[in-house]
Image: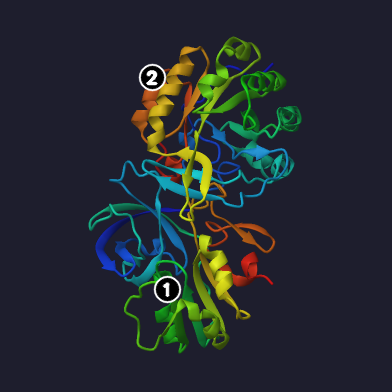
Amino acid sequence: MPKTDVVYSPPVLNAAGMLGFAPGTHGPVDLHRLGGFVTNSLSLRPRRPASSAGCLAFAGGFLLHTGYPNPGLIRALRQWAPAWERSPLPVLVSLLLQDVSEVVPMLEALETNPGVSGVEINLPSGAKPSDLLAVTRAAFSELAVVVRLPLDRAERMVQGIVNDLLEAGLAAISLGPPRGALVNPQGRLVHGRLYGPAIYPQNLSVTHALVSTGLPVISAGGVYSQAQVAELLAVGASAVQLDAVLWRNPGLVL
Amino acid sequence: MKLWQGTIREIRLGPSGRSAWIECPPQAQPAAGQYLLGWAFEDEDVPLAAPVFPAAFADGGFLAAAPIPKTWEPGTALILQGPLGRGFDLPVSSSRLVMAALGDTVERLTVLLPQVLAGGCAVAICAGCALPVLPPDVEIYPLDSLAEVLPWADFVVLDVPLSAFDRLKALLASPLPPGQVLVETAMPCGGLSECGACAVQGCRGPKLACRDGPVFSLSELAVFAG
């Protein structure tokens, strides 16, 4: 049976992409102040950095375009599964689907790993609500299944299928960065993920809306203070993920 | 990665913009070409820490090369992550060094001058940006002269924005001597997560400037191959 009643204590995790592929490998973040660790996103096949990878600032945040570089799930398991098993925290492996059919072989590769307590699934770009439901049903396993939805699409994606998702064993919806675009100094339009304090109001609004549907929600986006963590928990978030604040001051886990 | 506390002691306005004398423990001082990520406690709304490179060294701290964040003032308390990355490693045998900067500052290169001039090395700088006051021994050339100056050198150090690699290739008409390049690019995670935003094309696959650089040997990067 899938784990649907996952509780993170404290109810604070890192967001995918913020602390690398395994806990404990990078410096000053006090892992004991987190209730769980989310890995960088792993795809079934290796991915190289985007040819125009970069980071562009805007008022209140920044845009990140990276291409989600990673060595692929199988090589990642060889390299990091021992670290996941040694982790003092529950480990959620973040999965990046190119196609919904990839979820089954990826979960089969992970299920037997004692260090993995759950997965956070990122749907392919352009995914529809029917894809969200199909992935959740296909992800039926012993692992806790969290599906990550971009902030700007989360409410639309779950509309009308909340009960179906819960019946299918979904442990939680987590919120991913919204997407946007900026013109870089060379005059090129760059699309990417948006981070920064400017994202927080959208996060709070979407968290409140999703919690109201009955879904367990792991909130994320623009959280830079303990007060904001408390606000999100107060509106009903099950847990809160920290993203770029961990890069700004990794020693000050909130 | 380690965390340190630092304090801005002085702000200077130079040809490349604002630089800052940062007081910090000796273990926090980056070597030439390395960097720290710095964030001021007061900057609650700033989304990311800023990379700071050394432009000069002194007891008790270092001069952070321009540009520095606009909100940093004398007395500003900083959290400093690092030192991060790989810095310059010049061969002791070098006697004719060319420095070339394609960006807005030469300060990340001229930090090497005390060491190389003390070793008796002759130095020529090629730059298109405004220059600070330099020792009289240093010869200065416009950036467009780089291809003519390079044959004189036995080692070259470059400071190049990642976005200027195409322009660099156009300037490098002659075979290159051995050398190193500091790749200027955004490094938002400082190596903490291998996010990939600072990816540079290496001869044997992608490299991350935050962790594998920002100083690379010329032989490591695809832009200098062939």
Q: Could you tell me residue B41's position as x and y percent?
A: 30, 46
Q: Label 2 is placed on what type of residue?
A: Ala
Q: Could you tell me residue B218's position as x and y percent?
A: 60, 71
- The single residue placed furthest to the front in the displayed view is A187
Could you give the CA–CA distance between mark 2 and mark 1, rounded to whole angstroms?
55 Å
Above or below B48: residue A146: above
Going 54% across and 58% down the picture, which residue do you hit?
B209
Q: Could you tell me residue A167's position as x and y percent?
A: 64, 11
Dot 1: chain letter: B
Where residue B44 is drawn, which disc sits there? none
Above or below A96: residue B213: below
**In front of the other: label 2 or label 1?**
1
Q: Relative to the observer, which residue lies in front, A183 or A37?
A: A183
Left or right of A138: which side holds B63?
Answer: left
- In the rendered image, is residue A223 in sight? no
Left or right of B137: which side holds A190?
Answer: right
Q: Which residue is mark 1?
A: B128
Q: Which residue is mark 2?
A: A234
Q: Relative to the observer, which residue lies in front, A40 or B198?
A: B198
Element type at mark 2: helix
10 Å neighbourhood of mark 1: few (<14), some, or many (≥20)? some
Q: Label 1 is placed on what type of residue?
A: Gly
